[in-house]
Every structure is written in structure tokens, then in C-alpha cells.
Image: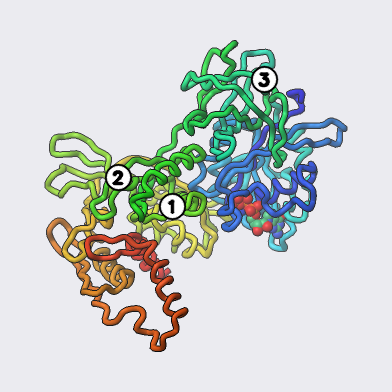
Amino acid sequence: MKQSNIRNFCIIAHIDHGKSTLADRFIQICGGLELREMQAQVLDNNPIERERGITIKAQAVSLEYKARNGEVYQLNLIDTPGHVDFSYEVSRSLASCEGALLVVDASQGVEAQSVANCYTALELNLDVLPVLNKVDLHNAEPERVAKEIEDVIGIPAQDALRISAKTGLNVPDVLEAVIANLPPPKGIEDAPLQALIVDSWFDNYLGVVSLVRVINGRIRKGQKMRVMSTGKDYEITSLGVHTPKRVFKDALETGEVGFLIAGIKDIFGAPVGDTLTDPSRPCAEQLPGFKKVQPRVFAGMFPIDADDFEDFRESLSKLRLNDSALQYEPENSTALGFGFRVGFLGMLHMEIVQERLEREYDINMITTAPSVVYEITGTDGEIRKIDNPAELPEGSEFEDIREPIINCRVLMPPDYVGPVMQLCMEKRGTQRNLKYFGNQVQMEVEMPMGEVVLDFFDRLKSVSRGYASFEYEFLRFQEAPLVKLDVLVNGDKVDALATIVHRDAAYARGRDLCERMQELIPRQMFDVAIQAAIGSKIIARSTVKAMRKNVLAKCYGGDISRKKKLLEKQKEGKKRMKQVGAVEIPQEAFLAVLGVERKSSKAD
Ligand SMILES: Nc1nc2c(ncn2[C@@H]2O[C@H](COP(=O)(O)OP(=O)(O)OP(=O)(O)O)[C@@H](O)[C@H]2O)c(=O)[nH]1
């Protein structure tokens, strides 16, 4: 395809504004799939994405579009996730495009991710084309929302197309606008090959499959390619594009986006962001790649069966190939044995990783309560990062402790300013700025990240009836009176249950935690004492009373099948338990601190 007829673009939007639905319409118009093959949100092909109705991974699809001017264009479209936890995926996809379609729900208006993603696109010098979606809804207000795009984001939007991705209204006009308004790629066709690895994933049969964007030169099937960071050469066995069906081709030309397979079995063989070139005529330099992303939340993950440790390690490394935001290192807990300390971008990311490990890799595990990264200065003056509360030394063994502070931008209708501000204050926030744009208010608040990652998203939604949205960025580490809250089960400290909390909240937190654990730990044959402590001082306590009868006692008659069922059920329940000393502790108890947070949010 000649370069002037190629358009590489992303669809960016706030969550649920209709990106994936719009991508479906494009695929339908361009005939990428037969009608019978179409299902809603075809690009969300991971089962977890389909169940939750969200996009997690960016997806690329190459479409052939016959424009009204009679010419055929190749449209390479990348669907991106909208949730704040996955904004990293968005910036990566944007870096491989020349333009972006900004989809805004005309019944909702501009939301935090519309602004954040659009700014990322503008920073990367992309041309942004706004479209107003869902105009079929009776409460759509395209005029107001167009003005909001101009006021809040600051790009012209009066002429933005009014569309319905659901009914297909005006969608063909969007494709025409993409061709007319977004620029074609600018690579040099006869330059040495230089291609960017946009994404890589592991296929059990094919090995590593990579999604690449050819920046300069061309890439042919059968040729040798070099991965520049490792200097290793591989032969390209096949390449092609997703339409979204996998279609094999002989070459990918300058500016094109497609997949390639080079028999790489080592999962670190084709790292995302790396540059590919031709070893017989290498390009001069590596592409800048992607900004390295830092996880914000850490949690311990431990296989329930110690024999699964190696499988667990392998599964994590496979997942990581496809999810470079995921980080992990081995961790040894006295209570839970060998496992990993895993870093995530946020709670949703953590949930998704946990679900993928369980479903795609069949790993049965216990996850501990998530924590942010703290910074301490030791008595020797050395500064250390602490991502595991259990590793925080006793109070007298360090000089000071600092917590991460973020700048949080909340967008909401004016009615909710009061409750949102109250929530932010409760989370130890300091308001920095408040701007009114007609129907939207933008509030900037500095808050400790530890207060935000656990449940801020849910609580913000609940105090604003779903109307407020937010995004944030890390600002600095700041000193705070933080203490380690330990939990003792029958007198033994359980390292995996430790958390770091603000001193003023420690007593209430300890009490709630003991109460919650009492509800969650099943009765055993003996009394189980649960205590919360700061250092050697016990601040709260509860007891799980001993069980009087066994599970089978309920079956008066000798109905064997019922007995079996009960035993089976008990066994099932056990799967997600871990023996700590003499006590069996279920998964939920390790996450009890989240329950405590949520409990205090019930008042909303
Ligand atoms: N009425 C109406 N509903 C729409 C329209 N476009 C999308 N929807 C609905 O809005 C919901 C969200 O659409 P998606 O396409 O999944 O949204 P998304 O932006 O891709 O969301 P994420 O992938 O999670 O970021 C779905 O229930 C769609 O059916 C539209 O034009 N009109």
C-alpha cells in the first residue's frame, strides 16, 4: 500500500464512551468480518474483557476502506483501554500512530480520561479528531459537549461529527474524516529497516508473536531481523495483519502495522518498545521506545500449593511479556512461604492479573493486601524504598518515613463538589485548584497515594452517583506519621497481614480489622485470638470461638451423597485457604483491610 493511503490511528476515550463499539462499526463497514462472525466489541477478545465489558489490552486491526474518492486506504486502528490503570497502554499505542480519534459520550460529556488521554496524544504530536458519540440517546447534548471539549480540553470541536456507534449513524463520515484530517505516515521507504515493537505476547504454539510498526524501510517474510537491545538475530517465519482475522502477507511496508513471528521461544526475546532492524543493513539508531512505567501498588502473591511455585514463576513471566507494567520479584513470607511481590498500576490491574493467573494459567493462590511504596531514611542516613509493610523496621530503627503524594484531578458536575471535597478531606487531601467550565468542575487535590489506591475510585463513584471521574500523577514523597500495624493470630505475628497506616487512624483501623477477621476466619477446633499491634503494644483484639461440631453433624440421616457434597464443599473452600501455624486462614482474611476500607465507605 502506498504510504499516502495509510492512516495509523488510535481511538481514545473515557471508559464506556463507546470506543470498542465504534471499532466494531469500522470493522463492519470495511468488511473485516462477515456479519455472522460479528459479535459486540470484537476487539475485546480476552474473556475477562468480555465479561467486564472493558478493554484492557490495546488491540490493532488493519482495515481496507474504499473511500468516496474511489481510492482504497489502509486504516490501521488501535483500540485502547479507557480505565486510569491502563493509561500506560494508551500512551504506547499512541506512540505508534499519527492521529487519534477522541470519542466523547454526548450524553455524559468530557471526563477525566478524555482529557488525560487527549493530552498524551497532543504531547506525542498526534492530530486529534473529536467525535461526539451516542447521539441516539434522548439525553444526548452534542452542543453542550462540543463546547465542553473546547473549554476543558482546548481543541476545536464545533464541527465534531455527531455519531452513534450503536446504530451506525454518521459512522462512514468518521472514516472519511480520518482520511481527510489525519496525516499519513512519513517513513523513508528505501532506508534501512527500522521497526518498533508495539506489543508482544506468548502463543503456546508459535512462541513470541509481536505487533510491529514499520517506521522506515520494509520487512519481508523469510528475511533475518535483529532485535537491537539484545543484538540477537532471528529469521522471520511469517508476518501479516489482523483484519481482525489473522491474514498472512509477504511483507510489511513503511508505515504499516502488523504482526510477525520469528520462532522466538524465549519470552524476553522481543521486548515491547524495542527496535527491529535488518542485520545485513542495520539502521543507525534505536527508536526511543516507551517510557518505563513504575508500578504504584504492590501485593504479595503466594501459590497455595508450594509445588506450584515454578509454574507460578513461568506464568508471571508469560503474562509480563504482554503486560510490561507488571513487575515481580520473589518474596519469602514466614506465614505463606515462597511467592512473589508483584507490582501493579492500580487495583483494577491487580484484579485482572489475579484473574488471568487463575483462569488462563490455572494458578491457585493467596493475594495479600495491596500497599503503595514508602520511602524511609535509616538511622545510618541511607534512603530505602519499602513496598512490603512487613519489611518496615521497628520505629526506633529508622529516622523518618515518607509516603507518596499524588496530584489528583477530578471532573464532576457542580452539584457534587461538596461531597467530593468532603471525601478528599477524609482522605487527607489538600485542595489545590477549582475551575468551573459551565457544567463541569475540575478540582485538583493533593492526596496521599495510599489513601487513593484502595477504594477512592469506588467511593468517588458512590458520592457522585457515578458522575465524577478522576486521574492522577505522582508528585513527591512527603514525611508523615506512619506506623506498621501488625496482626497476630494466636500470638504469632503474621507478616503477610501487616499494613502501614497513619498514626491517627491506627486504633480505629486495628479494631475494625480484628472485627472483620473474626467474621472471616472460620471456626477451628480451638479458640483463635486475633490481635492488632503497633510494635509490642496490642491495640485491639477479637476471638474466633472454637467449633463445637463437625460439618457432617448436620446430616442426621446417613445420606451419603449429601455427606459427600458437604465434604466436597469443604474441600473447595480449603483451596483458597492457607495454613498459618495451626490456623487456616482464607483468602478473604488476607484482604480484610480492603473490607475495612469499604465498610467505612458504606456511610456514603
Ligand atoms: N445508545 C448508545 N450506546 C452506545 C453507543 N456506543 C456505545 N454504546 C454502549 O456503551 C457501552 C460502552 O461501550 P464500549 O464500546 O464497550 O465502550 P469503551 O469506550 O470501549 O469502553 P472500555 O473499552 O471499557 O474503555 C456499551 O454498552 C455500548 O453498547 C451509542 O452510540 N449509542
- Disc 1 target residue: 363
Q: Position of residue 327 (x, y in %)?
A: 40, 40
The residue under the point 53% across, 61% down is 466
SS at mark 3 in the image: loop
Q: Is residue 241 left or right of residue 375?
A: right
Q: Position of residue 575 (x, y in %)?
A: 39, 62
Instruction: Say if mark 3 contacts mark 2, CB within 8 Å.
Output: no
Q: Position of residue 340 (x, y in %)?
A: 34, 45
Label number found at residue 331: 2
Count up the numbered dots. Answer: 3
What crowding class fits label 3: few (fewer than 14 Cα within 10 Å), some (14-19), or many (20 or more)?
many
Beta carbon of the mark 3 residue lies under 8 A of ligand 1: no
Q: Nearer the viewer, residue 360 or 324?
A: 360
SS at mark 2 in the image: strand
Instruction: Say if mark 1 contacts mark 3, CB within 8 Å.
Output: no
Q: Look at label 3 and name its amino acid.
A: Arg
Quadrant position of the C terminus in the picture: bottom left
Q: Position of residue 9 (x, y in %)?
A: 66, 35
| Residue occupying the far bottom of the picture | 557
Label number found at residue 218: 3
